[in-house]
Structures are given as C-alpha cells and as structure tokens.
Image (tube, rainbow, N blue to C red):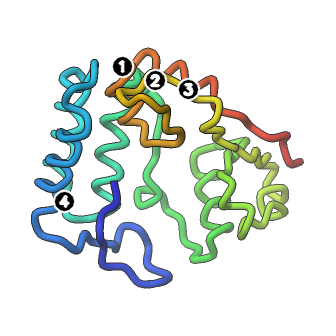
Amino acid sequence: MTLPVHAKLGMNIDEVTIATLGWREKVFRTVEQCYRKTSYFTTCWPSIQTSIEEAHDSLDDVNWKTFAAVLTLLGADAVRVERMANLAVTSNDPTIRLVEACKLVGATHYIAGRGGQNYLQVEEFQKEGIVVVWQEFDPGRVIYKQQGKVFVPGLSVIDCLFNTGPEETRSLALDAWVPTPEVK
C-alpha cells in the first residue's frame, strides 16, 4: 500500500502526515477487493484493520500500529521493540542517532538494511563496540501459494499472511532472512 503524504526532505517520519482524507476507507476497499477470497483473510484482516482504524493520520503511527499487529499475528509480539521517539537520542546525524539508540538499549549488534550502505558510517558503530550486520531480505527465497496463477515475489507481508496464514508466514520470513557477514 502506498499512502500519499505531506513530507519534505529531511523531515522525521513522526512529522509526516497522510495527505488524503478518507485514506482508511480506500485502503480497506483495496485490501478487501484483493484478498477477501484468500484462505486466511478472515483470520488476519480484523487485527490489521483495527490497527489502521486506531492510527492517527501520521505515517509513523500507521506504520507502528500495523507493524505491531503483524508482529502479534506472527507470534512475535513478545519481541522487544523500542520507538526512537521514546529514547533520549540527541544527535541529528543519522548514524550517530542509531549508535546512541543502540547504546541506550544495550545493543551489541545493529542489523542494517541494504539502504544503510548508502549513508551508514560503520566506523561510528565500531568505536562503541557495536557490530553491524547487513541484512539482505531475499524475496526470491519466499515462494508460497498465492491466489493468482503466476507467483508474484516481493509483495507485502499481508499477502503472505492472507494466503498462507501466520505460522507459514513466520516460517517463510525466518527462512528468507539472510544476514551478510558481520562488519567488525
């Protein structure tokens, strides 16, 4: 799902607002039209729908609430997840903010997505004894039965949830997680 937003370069995600009135109804219609005939739609959709209903018109809040709903569906809701806004991070530098956050939660490793390779200053983590692990999600490793005739890789986690259910989605996600060698 793509949501139109009011955002400017350099804005923090918690400052980004959704630009269209009635966006929830559009999301609900789209999801229901695409997925109502899938095997696990009635099992998984209510909690995701509720998370969207309860979210404020902030991209950060929508992301947070749907993320929490998906974690619960996957049985991973006991995983400790901290919001950056709740941490006493002071730097505006993207790398230093992450290092500060890692230190505040006692992290020894930082799992970085591939986009971080464009800006992350690994040496700042190394100075603090934090190991950076580059995570590469490989959608080609996640193949499951979809409702269409041709498999479409790389769709949202809700596609997998609605088509295969929480247990299989969790198993597929864990199998597709491919960390690259640690950067020391």
Q: Which residue is mark 3?
A: 143
Q: Are marks 1 and 2 in contact (CB under 8 Å)?
A: yes
Which is more foreground, mark 3 or mark 1? Answer: 3
Name the residue: 27% across, 24% down.
38
Q: Which residue is mark 4?
A: 56
121 left or right of 140 in image: right
Which is more foreground, mark 4 or mark 1? Answer: 1
Q: CA distance from mark 4 to mark 1?
A: 28 Å
Q: CA distance from mark 4 to mark 3?
A: 34 Å
Which is more foreground, mark 3 or mark 2? Answer: 3
Q: Which residue is mark 2?
A: 169
Q: Which residue is mark 1?
A: 165
Q: CA distance from mark 4 to mark 2?
A: 28 Å
133 left or right of 181 in image: left
Q: Is residue 110 above or below residue 5?
A: above
Q: CA distance from mark 3 to mark 2?
A: 10 Å
Q: CA distance from mark 1 to mark 2?
A: 6 Å
> Which of marks 3 and 4 precedes in the sequence?
4
Residue furthest to the right in view is: 184
Answer few, some or many: residues within 10 Å of disc 3's Cα (few below 14, many 20 plus, some between 14 and 19): some
